[in-house]
Image (spheres, rainbow, N blue to C red):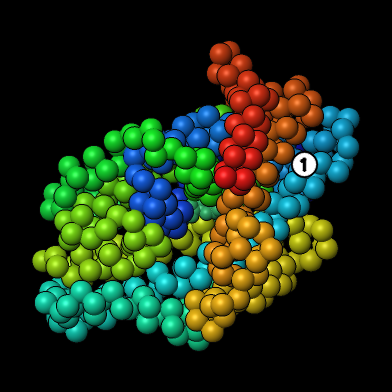
Amino acid sequence: ANNSGTTATKREGWSSRTAFALAAIGAAVGLGNLWRFPAEAGENGGGAFVLFYILCVLLIGLPVLLSETLIGRHGQASAPESVRRLAIESGASKHWDIFASIGVFAAFLILSFYCVVGGWVLYYVGVFINDLFHTGVMGGAFQGRPAEDIESLLPGLFGDGQLMVGLQLLFLGITVYFVARGVSKGIEWVATWMMPAFFVLLILITVYGFATGAASETVDYLFTFDFSKLTPQVMLAAVGQAFFSLSLGVAGMITYGAYAGRDVNLGKTSGIIASADTAVALIAGLCIFPIVFAAGLSASAGPGLIFQSLPVAFQNMPIGSLVGVAFFVMVAFAALTSSVSLLEVPTSWMMERFDISRVTSVLIVGMGAAVLGSLAAFSFNDMADFRPLALIPLFAEANFFDALDGVTSKLFMPIGALLTCIFVGWVADPKLIDRENGLDGALHKLWRFLVRYLCPAALIGIMVSGLSA
Ligand code: PHE
C-alpha cells in the first residue's frame, strides 16, 4: 500500500491508509483547536461563533479539504506542481499554480509564528514539571499562592525576548528534525505515536474538567445561539478559524494528499479528518471552559486563556500540577504534528523545484522560519511598537506576530480556498477529478454544487463584508 506504485519514481509516501488519515488529522488538530478556537470563541461571543464555525466546516471547509487532497493525489508532486499538472491535463493555463505557490508562502508564514506559540507550550510543560518535582506529591508549589503569581508567568515570558526566541528555536528545531527524517519515518512516525496519546490525554482531562468544573455554564456558553452576535467580523473570524483549524488554503492538504496512495477513498477520509478536527475543537472548549468558569475567570481572555486562566485553575485543583503537565504535553504533541505539516509544504516544494535533498531543503526553510519567528517573538517585547502593516486599516494595530496571524487566516487562507474552489469546480476537467474524489450519487452532486457555487459565493461575501466592516 505505497504511493501509486506504477511508476519507477522513488517519491516518498505514507505507508498505509491509516497513516495518511492520522497524519492529516495530526496536521489539522493543533494549536488551532486548543489555543486559537477557545480564544476566538471567547472573544467573539461564544455560541454564535461556534455555530457559524461548524456551518463553515461543513459547507466550506469539507468541500475544500476534499478538493485539496484530490489535487495532491492526482499530481503526486509538491503543491504548485500538482496544480500545474492538473491544469495542463485539463487544457487550462499552467499559471493556475499561482494559488498553490501563494499557499506555500503562507504555510511558511504560519510556521514562523506557530513555533513561537509552540515555544510557550514548551515553557509551560517546563513550569508544571518543575512544580511537580518541587513538591513531591502532585500538590504543586503553586497551590495556595496568589493567582497573580501564576498569571504573571506569561507577561514574564513575553517580556523576555531572548527566552522566547530560544524556546521558539527549540520547538522549530524539533520540527526540523522530524521533517528531515522524511515522510514515513519522520512525519508519519510523529503522528502515529503522538495522536493516539493526544486523544487519551484529551479525554482524561475533559472528563476531569467536566466532572469537577462548571459544566452547565460551559454548555450554555458554547451552544446558546444568539443571532444578534453574528456580525460580519464574527463571521470572518469563524471562516478564518475553520480554515486555520482544517489547515486549508495554504497548500498543506495538497501536499499531504500527494503522498496518499490510490487505495485511499479521499471523500471518506476528508470526512473523517474534518469530523475529528471539529470534535477536538469542541471537546477542547468543553475541556477548557468548565475549568476556567469554575475558577471564576473570564471567557474572553483571548490568547491568554490556556496560558494564564487555565494555569490559575490548575493551581486550585487537587492534582493540579499533574493535570498541568498532562495538559501542556498534550498541547505540545498536537502542535508538533501540525508544525511538521507546515514545514513539509515549503520543504517539499524546494526539494522538487531546486532538485536538492530533503535535509538541505528543510534546513533552508528552517533558517528562514527562525528569522521570521524571532521577529514575531520580539514583537511581544523589544519590537512591541513595530506595526508592519500600518497602512492596511484592518491590520494597522497589529504587531508583527498578530500581522502574521491576521494576514494568513483572514486573507491568504480564504483567498487560497476561493481559488481552489474555482480551480476544482470550474477549471479542472471533471473526468480527472471524479476519478479521485471517491464520491458518487447525491453526495457527489452536493459536493460539486458546494465547490462551484456556494463556497465561492460565501467566501467572497464573507471576505468583502468582514474586511470592509
Ligand atoms: N490546523 C493547524 C492547527 O489547527 C494549523 C495549520 C494550519 C497546520 C495550516 C497546517 C496548515 O493548529
- Left or right of 139: which side holds 38? right
Under 8 Å from ligand 1: the CB of mark 1?
no
- Left or right of 223: which side holds 188? right
- Left or right of 22: which side holds 41? left
| Residue depicted at x 14% and y 65% | 317
| Relative depth, front residue between 31 and 187 | 31
Q: In which quarter of the image is the N terminus?
A: top right
- Left or right of 50: which side holds 370? right
Residue 126 percent across, percent down from the top left? 33, 77
Q: Quadrant of the rendered structure where residue 304 is? A: bottom left
* Amino acid type, label 1: Val
Is residue 176 in view from this perspective? no
| Residue depicted at x 63% and y 57% | 393
| Relative depth, front residue between 19 and 120 | 120
Q: In which quarter of the image is the C terminus?
A: top right
Secondary structure type for disc 1: helix
Residue 104 percent across, percent down from the top left? 70, 55
Residue 191 percent across, percent down from the top left? 47, 54
Is residue 377 in view from this perspective? yes
Residues packed near mark 1 inside 10 Å, few (<14), some (14 to 19) or many (20 plus): many
Please name the residue that numbered disc 1 is placed on: 83
Q: How many labels does the image show?
A: 1
| Residue depicted at x 74% and y 57% | 349
Residue 89 percent across, percent down from the top left? 85, 32
- Vertical placement of residue 328 versus 280, above or below: below
| Residue depicted at x 61% and y 63% | 396
